[in-house]
Each structure stands twice: as structure tokens, then as C-alpha cells.
Image: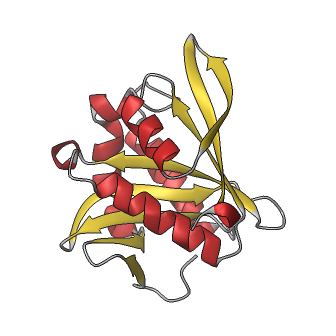
Amino acid sequence: MLKSPGAALTDGLVSLREISRGDVEVLYDWRMHPESRAMFRTTSAVPYDVHLRLLDEYFQRDSSDCWFLIEAAGQPVGAISLLNFDQEGAACQAGRLVIAPEQRGNGYARRAFKLLLEYARSIGVCQLYCEVLASNAIVIRLTRSLGFVDMAVRSEGGRSFIELRCDLRSLV
């Protein structure tokens, strides 16, 4: 996690800051938007109280997970996270990527993902992996362009997911 409250990672246009309790509603709205929901493993509507429990667990547990709000010009435009760290902290998953529907196509996901890669490398992560719905051509193209390579295809519930990995040591 970032060392100080309110600290942010930025490239000058896009910033990542750790989510706060004040972000609960916007995170829920983005995740429950029908276009967003279709891209997640669980496509059914999540009751608000279940969403609150997930966030409460995030804020209360002592883990290495990092859940970031993506901001552009000081306004929230999406979210992304690092989670499921291995015991050494050398490998983890990138996930929970969601961009506000009205903000899609502005390049915020790419910029945020680049910041996430830099941050992961700075905290000692060597291997980053993600899982993307096979029909999500935009995120597949994005991750591949950032150095992720296909490792496997997995089927679940009649849908296919591509598992991708990125060796952060090989990125320039």
C-alpha cells in the first residue's frame, strides 16, 4: 500500500490513490453498470450490502492488496487494484479494472495500468498476472501492448477467460 494517507501515484494527467470509504458508492455504480458487469467473472447484480462487506474487509484486514481509484483532473474515472500477492510479495494479480462508462475511450485505463505496473515494480513485484474475459478485446489488446503474454485459456460458466502474465523485470 501507499505509505501515507492521501498519497497518489501520477503521470501528470492520471492519478491513482488508494480507495477510501467515501468511494463506496461510485465503485458500486461503476461495477453494477450493465456494460461493466458483463466483463466481470460474476455478472449478476451484487447486493449493496455484499459490496459494503467486501470493502469493509479490504479496509479492516492486514494484507498487501492495493485498491486504487483512478482520477483525471481530480475527478474519479475508474478503479484498478493489485491483489492476491504471493507470500514473498514477488507475484500478484492486477484486477478490478473498471472505467466509468462516460469516461471510456479517453486512455485512462492505459495510463492507470502503466502507473500500476510502475508501482508494482517499485514494491518488489516481479510477476504480474491478470485474467480477462476472452470477448473483452479492448482490455486484451491493452494488456498485451503493456507486455502481458497469454498463458492459458480457461472456461467457467460457459465463458472463456484468458490468463495473462507480465514479467516486470523485462519491462523498460
Report the residue at 47% width, 36% height from top: 140
Report the residue at 56% width, 51% height from top: 147
Q: Residue 37: percent from the left, percent from the top?
A: 37, 31
Observer-nearest of 75 and 118: 118
Where on the picture, by quarter, is residue 119?
Answer: bottom right
Q: Residue 170: percent from the left, percent from the top?
A: 67, 62
The colour scheme of the drawn protein is secondary structure
In the rendered picture of this protein, how many numbered marks are placed on residues? 0
What quarter of the picture does the C terminus occupy? bottom right
Residue 87 vs 50, above or below: the answer is below
* In the displayed structure image, the side of residue 158 where residue 31 appears, left or right: left
Where on the picture, by quarter, is residue 89?
Answer: bottom right
Residue 115 vs 79, above or below: the answer is below
Residue 56 vs 149, above or below: the answer is below
Q: Residue 108: percent from the left, percent from the top?
A: 29, 57
Residue 163 vs 29, above or below: the answer is above
Q: Is residue 25 visible?
A: no
Observer-nearest of 9 and 69: 9
What quarter of the picture does the N terminus occupy? bottom right
- Residue farthest to the right? 87
- Residue farthest to the top? 158
* In the displayed structure image, the side of residue 136 where residue 81 appears, left or right: right
* In the displayed structure image, the side of residue 104 where residue 1 appears, left or right: right
Report the residue at 30% width, 45% height from top: 30
Q: Is residue 100 visible?
A: yes
